[in-house]
């Protein structure tokens, strides 16, 4: 028994650490978002159903809002897009965070 405990203790000390350290490089809060990033009214590079808009359009359609300590960025929730053939949403882990998530949406009977 002592030998098993000693072996486990040695293995726990010998195992490599999988942690990482991060440091804050920018602190962008509230209305600072509006000047820290660019709005680009461009075609969707993935050829999907996305319409990118400029800052004036985003503001007039209430897609962005900023105050001293709050920033809201939202999608158009008024336009209904219903893909008849189905849709796959994939959310991949970022910064070594897991697990990845996927959702499949289909029409009834598909």
Image (cartoon, rainbow, N blue to C red):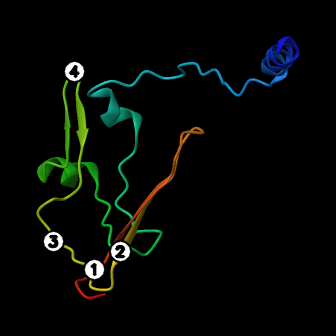
In this rendering, which labeled residue sits more in front, label 3 or label 4? 3
- Crowding near the residue tagged with mark 4, few <14, some 14–19, many ≥20 C-alpha atoms within 10 Å: few
Q: Earlier in the sequence, mark 3 or mark 4?
A: 4
Q: Nearer the viewer, residue 48 or 56?
A: 48
Q: What is the spatial separation of the Cα atoms under label 2 and label 1, in whole angstroms? A: 7 Å
Whole-percent x, y for residue 104 in the image:
37, 70
Taking 7 as reference, is 44 left or right?
left
User: Which residue in the structure is indicated by mark 2?
Assistant: 87
> Are dots 2 and 1 in contact, CB under 8 Å?
yes
Q: Residue at x 30, y 78 (%)?
A: 106
Taking 78 as reference, is 86 left or right?
right
> Are dots 3 and 4 in contact, CB under 8 Å?
no
Q: Nearer the viewer, residue 49 or 41?
A: 49
Q: What is the spatial separation of the Cα atoms under label 3 and label 4, in whole angstroms? A: 32 Å
Image position of 110 with respect to 63: above or below: below
Does dot 4 land on a helix, a strand or a loop?
A: loop
User: Which residue in the structure is indicated by mark 4?
Assistant: 68
Whole-percent x, y for residue 98 in the image:
53, 43
Q: What is the spatial separation of the Cα atoms under label 3 and label 1, in whole angstroms? A: 10 Å
In this rendering, which labeled residue sits more in front, label 1 or label 4? 1
User: Which residue in the structure is indicated by mark 3?
Assistant: 80
> Are dots 2 and 3 in contact, CB under 8 Å?
no
Q: What is the spatial separation of the Cα atoms under label 2 and label 4, in whole angstroms? A: 37 Å
Q: Quadrant of the N terminus?
A: top right
Q: Earlier in the sequence, mark 2 or mark 3?
A: 3
Q: What is the spatial separation of the Cα atoms under label 2 and label 3, in whole angstroms? A: 14 Å
In this rendering, which labeled residue sits more in front, label 3 or label 1? 1
User: Which residue in the structure is indicated by mark 1?
Assistant: 83
Q: Residue at x 21, y 51 (%)?
A: 58
Q: What is the spatial separation of the Cα atoms under label 1 and label 4, in whole angstroms? A: 38 Å
Whole-percent x, y for residue 101 in the image:
45, 55
In this rendering, which labeled residue sits more in front, label 2 or label 3? 2
């Amino acid at each position: 028994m002592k030998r098993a405990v000693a072996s486990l203790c040695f293995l726990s000390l010998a195992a490599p650490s999988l942690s990482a350290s991060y440091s804050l490089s920018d602190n962008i809060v509230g209305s600072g978002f509006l000047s820290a990033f660019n709005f680009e009214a461009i075609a969707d590079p993935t050829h999907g159903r996305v319409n990118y808009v400029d800052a004036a359009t985003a503001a007039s359609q209430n897609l962005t809002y900023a105050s001293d300590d709050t920033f809201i960025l939202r999608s158009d929730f008024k336009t209904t897009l219903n893909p008849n053939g189905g849709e796959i949403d994939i959310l991949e882990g970022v910064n070594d965070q897991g697990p990845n998530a996927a959702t499949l949406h289909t029409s009834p009977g598909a």
